[in-house]
Image (cartoon, rainbow, N blue to C red):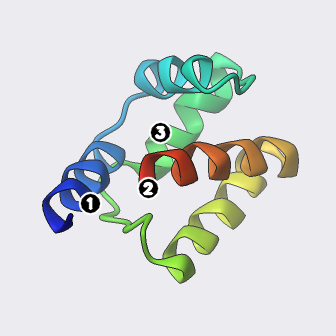
Amino acid sequence: MKLLQNVINYKINIITGDELLKYAKQFNVRLSKSDADKIAAHLRGKNFNVFDDQQRTKIIKDVAKIAGPETAKKINQIFIQFSK
């Protein structure tokens, strides 16, 4: 399980805006190209652990500042889907 967590965290830490848009579409989350690029830029290189509740909460708060609370909730849904 730890290996899978590492792979998911690695992917999130190198994600591009286009990849984030692809995942958003896959999980039926509406996201603009501009917001996806901003969120991906924020996530890239930060070494967040989306399986840690405190770190994920911080990420979601940052996303809310970038793209609004509704988008942040939807991004959180994507993270939750990744962690299942």
Task: Determine which of the numbered discs, if any, sits on residue 79 in the image.
Answer: none
Amino acid of disc 1: Gln
Q: Residue 82 at what x, y percent from top left?
A: 44, 47
Residue with the mark numbered 2:
83
Q: Label 3 to label 2, Cα distance in Å?
A: 18 Å
Amino acid of disc 2: Ser
Question: How many circles with numbers are drawn on the protein?
Answer: 3
Horizontal arrangement in the rendering, residue 17 relative to residue 69 (left or right): left
User: What residue lies at 66% left-to-right and 61% top-to-bottom?
Assistant: 60
Q: Label 3 to label 1, Cα distance in Å?
A: 19 Å
Q: Residue 75 at what x, y percent from top left?
A: 64, 45
Marks 2 and 1 close (CB-CB < 8 Å):
yes
Q: Residue 11 at what x, y percent from top left?
A: 28, 43
Select label 3 or label 1 by which is in front.
1
Horizontal arrangement in the rendering, residue 74 relative to residue 44 (left or right): right
Going from N to C along the chain, the mark reached first, 2 or 1, is 1
Kind of element beneath mark 1: helix
Kind of element beneath mark 3: helix
Label 1 crowd bin: few (<14), some (14–19), many (20+), radius 10 Å: some
Q: Residue 59 at what x, y percent from top left?
A: 57, 64
